[in-house]
């Protein structure tokens, strides 16, 4: 094939830059900043209210988590980070559809994977700000304490979960190309992921088969590693291996599913319609 | 214009909203599944923090027994408010998004009738979704209720719905003059969940925060519904709650209507109708 073909790095950088411009346009409306700042406050405040009726015989306390506010604050922060990355890929495709640029993007001789990962990276940077915000709320408003010594393990767990969630996100993007309603799909999926990830309670509380399903989602193990590292100072190192396997599996499966579903959309001529 | 004319406008808007609604099937599924997931999250959170047979902490706040019914009722009414926040609250903003706001405002139809049509459809639409979601969670968890006075329970549910509706209309005025109507509508759901005590007894909060809760109509609706459906309270027991709920609902509706009229005037004078 003749002509210019950009490298993967160039595509990734261009994708990241396009994401940054979208974000700037979005946050020019003050309401989006209000959402970003207020939602974590009320989430953590709800955990604080629930902690008033917590019992030492409860499952959370028996697993060694004495501070339910910290349990939910970290769960919420990292859940948001991981799922935002998951959904960004699909939302990105939908944005291109709505703007009428999807066909152009997919017809250019550029790596799809680099393009999708560029958006996911941009989303990751924004959600890291969310994590910082929740941590600040937790430490300042609720006088919480975190074990900074566990931070390297928490980071390792987070990165491996992110890789797995990005793989899942790429598969979801393939579904979006065919379903055309990513926002409704994401809004619907979010509370179920909250339920299965153990964001507000240990997954051991779920019925057996549901717990088994929850353990197939990278975010579940990721949150467990982060919590055990930062709240207990005793990282669940054994979960890092499982997370690494899940990351590889989801990336391979996600990319394969995306390519298959993208090919289907091309065959049926539905790439640009939504 | 007579009452029949207004009724035709209300019906036309409600039917139009219905037709738009059934075009987007994923959003209908969303209305049904979201409340189920949220209630289950809270049920498992309660079970995990309270431990087996240790609901004394909840009893100390006036809600003895299984917390599942408490949570189901809280989530159902909160979902109803959330839906009406989008339907009634965003009625004017939605016309702007559809590009039909100027047409609506030029039509010889009452703005309030348009708002009422959207609200009426919202009530029906959110009502059946909330009811079915509640049935699903009851089936999944085996929650039980204690209704001694069915009339009081029905009156409480109806007035709680009116309270939620009045809050939606009250917010409509707020949303007209801002480009951030969508995100504000999202943001408002979280303090509402917190201050109304939909997920925990309001008495857990410090007094100053409880005052905020008791300025919201839905708080009274929630308490009345919970007392009549979980504790077997009668009309005499919840009468004062319903009375306050009604007063606050009337105030909220009047405020919303006045705000919409004022905002429309400002937008017309400044040429802002399509700015946001």
Image (cartoon, coloured by chain):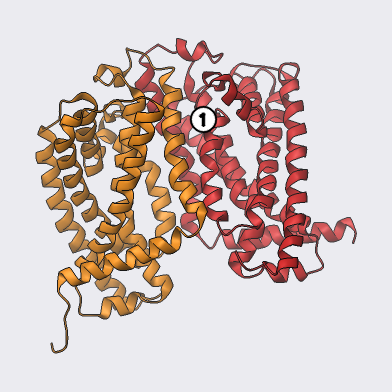
Q: In this view, does A60 lie to the left or right of B114?
A: left
Residue that protrudes farthest toward the bottom in the picture? A2
Q: Quadrant location of residue A207?
A: top left
Q: Is residue B251 left or right of residue A158?
A: right
Q: In this view, does B240 lie to the left or right of A74?
A: right
Q: Which of B170 and B69 is in front in this view?
A: B170
For the point 75% across and 21% down, which residue is it?
B240
Q: Where is residue B224 in the image (x, y as percent from the top left)?
A: 66, 24
Name the image quarter holding the N terminus of chain B: bottom right
Q: Is residue A197 above or below residue A66?
A: below
Q: Colour of chain B?
A: red
Q: Chain A is drawn in which colour?
A: orange
For the point 29% across and 38% down, which residue is it?
A197
For the point 32% across and 21% down, which residue is it?
A67
For the point 10% across and 33% down, which residue is it?
A238
Name the image quarter holding the C terminus of chain B: bottom right
Q: Where is residue A78 in the image (x, y as percent from the top left)?
A: 29, 41
Q: Quadrant location of residue A225?
A: top left
Residue at the disc numbered 1: B72
Q: In this view, does A258 lie above or below B49?
A: below
């Amino acid at each position: 094939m003749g002509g210019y073909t950009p490298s993967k790095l160039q595509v990734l950088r261009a994708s990241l830059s396009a994401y940054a411009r979208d974000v700037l346009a979005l946050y020019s409306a003050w309401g989006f900043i209000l959402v970003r700042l207020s939602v974590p406050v009320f989430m953590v405040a709800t955990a604080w209210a629930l902690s008033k009726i917590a019992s030492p015989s409860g499952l959370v306390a028996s697993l060694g988590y004495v501070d339910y506010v910290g349990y939910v604050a970290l769960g919420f922060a990292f859940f948001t980070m991981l799922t935002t990355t998951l959904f960004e890929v699909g939302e990105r495709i939908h944005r291109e559809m709505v703007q009428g640029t999807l066909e152009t993007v997919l017809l250019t001789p550029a790596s799809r994977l680099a393009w999708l990962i560029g958006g996911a990276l941009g989303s990751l940077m924004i959600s890291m700000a969310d994590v910082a915000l929740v941590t600040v709320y937790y430490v300042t408003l609720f006088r919480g304490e975190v074990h900074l010594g566990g931070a390297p393990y928490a980071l390792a767990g987070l990165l491996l979960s992110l890789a797995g969630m990005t793989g899942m996100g790429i598969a979801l993007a393939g579904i979006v190309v065919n379903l055309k309603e990513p926002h409704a799909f994401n809004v619907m999926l979010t509370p179920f992921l909250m339920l299965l990830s153990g964001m507000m309670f240990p997954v051991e509380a779920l019925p057996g088969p549901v717990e088994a399903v929850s353990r197939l989602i990278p975010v579940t193990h990721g949150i467990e590693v982060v919590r055990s590292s930062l709240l207990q100072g005793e990282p669940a190192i054994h979960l890092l291996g499982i997370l690494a396997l899940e990351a590889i599996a989801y990336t391979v499966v996600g990319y394969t599913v995306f390519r298959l579903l993208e090919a289907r959309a091309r065959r049926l001529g539905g790439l640009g319609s939504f | 214009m007579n009452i029949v004319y207004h009724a035709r406008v209300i019906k036309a808007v409600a039917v139009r909203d219905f037709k738009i609604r059934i075009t987007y099937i994923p959003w209908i599924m969303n209305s049904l599944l979201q409340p189920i997931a949220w209630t289950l999250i809270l049920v498992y959170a309660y079970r995990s923090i309270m431990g087996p047979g240790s609901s004394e902490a909840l009893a100390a706040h006036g809600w003895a027994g299984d917390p599942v019914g408490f949570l189901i009722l809280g989530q159902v009414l909160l979902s109803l408010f959330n839906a009406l926040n989008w339907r009634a609250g965003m009625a004017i903003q939605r016309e702007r998004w559809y590009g039909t706001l100027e047409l609506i405002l030029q039509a010889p139809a009452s703005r309030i009738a348009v708002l009422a049509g959207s609200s009426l459809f919202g009530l029906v639409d959110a009502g059946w979704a909330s009811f079915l979601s509640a049935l699903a969670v009851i089936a999944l968890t085996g929650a039980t209720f204690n209704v001694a006075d069915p009339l009081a329970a029905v009156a409480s549910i109806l007035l709680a719905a009116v309270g939620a509706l009045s809050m939606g209309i009250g917010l409509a005025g707020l949303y007209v003059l801002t480009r951030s109507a969508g995100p504000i509508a999202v943001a408002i759901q979280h303090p509402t969940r917190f201050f109304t005590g939909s997920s925990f007894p309001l008495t857990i909060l410090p007094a100053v925060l409880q005052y905020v809760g008791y300025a919201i109509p839905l708080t009274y609706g929630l308490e009345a519904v919970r007392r009549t459906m979980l504790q077997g309270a009668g009309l005499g027991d919840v009468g004062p709650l319903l009375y306050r709920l009604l007063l606050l609902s009337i105030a909220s509706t009047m405020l919303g209507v006045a705000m919409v009229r004022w905002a429309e005037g400002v937008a017309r004078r400044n040429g802002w109708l399509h700015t946001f």
